[in-house]
């Protein structure tokens, strides 16, 4: 009887999970030049998670200003209602879903709301996230697991919902996952966050290749933000005695929103926000040991300020954070924009200008 039950369980498992046909995939040619045509922003329905503050809030407002219809998700229902009212009063179309992205049922509810309200969605932005500050050995495993539930599993659930919809419709769509400069090179005092973003980067790269191999109608973009001025630190779970904060060079959330919306209409593999993010990745790859020492020297003193750290109750790790704030209380050197994003949007023009500058410099040098 026990054996028969085990056989039945095994049969059920096979039936529900399905199997990947290796032979079928191996026969498919590698797509060297995929021609995915995405809609213009004004013609899109865009899903944004983590929309109640920071990057998500700025992206929602920017997308609405360009004519997109929006499906906004976060845990803070009051902030979402306020945002939707604001956008509708400006003549825009938006709905919201109170959702915890770490819950797959909530993710499915977001997708269902978009389909019920607009009949579809064209871009899905996995933006929701939270961090933990503290020495790795001081952070509880419970807190680590909870953060992974949001930062990694939220991206996985969102990715699967988006890809399923795009493949069923057969119409090209964009999946945009927000990573981090700490997703390619580790960070001190944010080890769990860095580990989760490493997982997001690996997941995003892997599914991109799989979807390209099967020629699925999905553009997959990984966003690499540098240090951004948002309520990121105010929402953090902190084990530090001092308040987490960005010091040193930081970028405005508008630069990230600009990169996200550009990728929603133009297939891009990666978008780096700030040369800071690109240089950090480049140094970590070419000179890993030296980069370790630079991180140890620079990132301990520049990830907090002199204020006492906020209490655990004020963290957004387990509960909603305060909403409707685009910026944080960071004391760093604020850049007005990201020239790297601007260059990435117009690579040929940037290359031509760089070439022209090099020629001009060469001519001037010869004249001397």
Image (cartoon, rainbow, N blue to C red):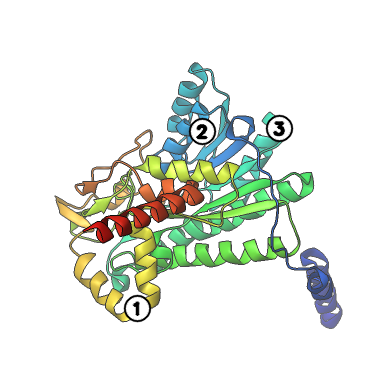
Q: Is residue 129 left or right of residue 211?
A: left
Please state the horizontal and vertical placement of residue 5, each as a whole percent of the image: 83, 76
- What is the C-alpha distance between the residues marked 2 and 3? 20 Å
Determine the secondary structure under disc 2.
helix
- What is the C-alpha distance between the residues marked 1 and 3? 49 Å
Residue 191, by quadrant, is bottom left
The C terminus lies in which quarter of the figure? bottom left
Please state the horizontal and vertical placement of residue 118, each as a whole percent of the image: 68, 30
Kindly indicate whether the residue at mark 3 contacts the one at mark 1 (C-beta within 8 angstroms).
no
Comparing 123 with 101, the one in front is: 123
Of callouts 1 and 3, the N-terminal one: 3
Residue beneath disc 2: 63
Determine the secondary structure under disc 1.
helix
Of callouts 2 and 3, the N-terminal one: 2
Please state the horizontal and vertical placement of residue 362, each as a whole percent of the image: 32, 59
Tell me the residue at 34%/78% (across/down): 288
Residue beneath disc 1: 288
Comparing 83 with 268, the one in front is: 268
Comparing 211 with 141, the one in front is: 211
Give above or below for 48 relative to 203.
above
């Amino acid at each position: 009887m026990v054996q028969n039950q085990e056989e039945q369980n095994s049969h059920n498992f096979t039936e529900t999970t399905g199997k990947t046909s290796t032979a079928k995939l191996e026969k498919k040619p590698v797509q060297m030049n995929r021609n995915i045509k995405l809609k213009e922003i004004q013609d899109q329905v865009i899903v944004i998670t983590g929309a109640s503050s920071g990057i998500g809030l700025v992206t929602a407002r920017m997308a609405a200003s360009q004519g997109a219809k929006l499906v906004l998700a976060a845990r803070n229902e009051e902030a979402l209602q306020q945002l939707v009212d604001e956008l509708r009063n400006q003549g825009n179309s938006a709905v919201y879903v109170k959702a915890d992205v770490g819950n797959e049922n909530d993710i499915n509810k977001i997708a269902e709301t978009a389909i019920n309200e607009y009949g579809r969605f064209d871009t899905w932005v996995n933006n929701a996230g939270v961090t933990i500050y503290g020495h790795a050995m001081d952070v509880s495993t419970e807190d680590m697991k909870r953060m992974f539930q949001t930062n990694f599993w939220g991206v996985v659930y969102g990715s699967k919902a988006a890809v399923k919809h795009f493949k069923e419709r057969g119409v090209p769509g964009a999946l945009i996952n927000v990573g981090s400069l700490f997703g390619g090179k580790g960070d001190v005092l944010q080890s769990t966050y860095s580990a989760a973003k490493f997982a997001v980067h690996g997941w995003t790269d892997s599914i991109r290749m799989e979807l390209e191999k099967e020629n699925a109608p999905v553009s997959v973009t990984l966003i690499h933000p540098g240090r951004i001025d948002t309520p990121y630190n105010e929402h953090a779970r902190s084990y530090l005695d001092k308040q987490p904060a960005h010091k040193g060079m930081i970028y405005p959330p508008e630069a990230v929103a600009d990169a996200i919306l550009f990728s929603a209409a133009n297939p891009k593999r990666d978008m780096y926000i700030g040369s800071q993010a690109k240089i950090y990745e480049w140094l970590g790859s070419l000179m890993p040991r030296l980069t370790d020492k630079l991180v140890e020297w620079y990132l301990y003193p520049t990830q907090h300020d002199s204020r006492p750290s906020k209490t655990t109750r004020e963290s957004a790790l387990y509960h909603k954070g305060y909403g409707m704030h685009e910026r944080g209380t960071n004391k760093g050197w604020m850049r007005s924009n990201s020239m790297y994003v601007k260059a990435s949007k117009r690579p040929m023009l940037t290359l031509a200008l760089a070439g022209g500058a090099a020629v001009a410099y060469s001519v001037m040098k010869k004249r001397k």
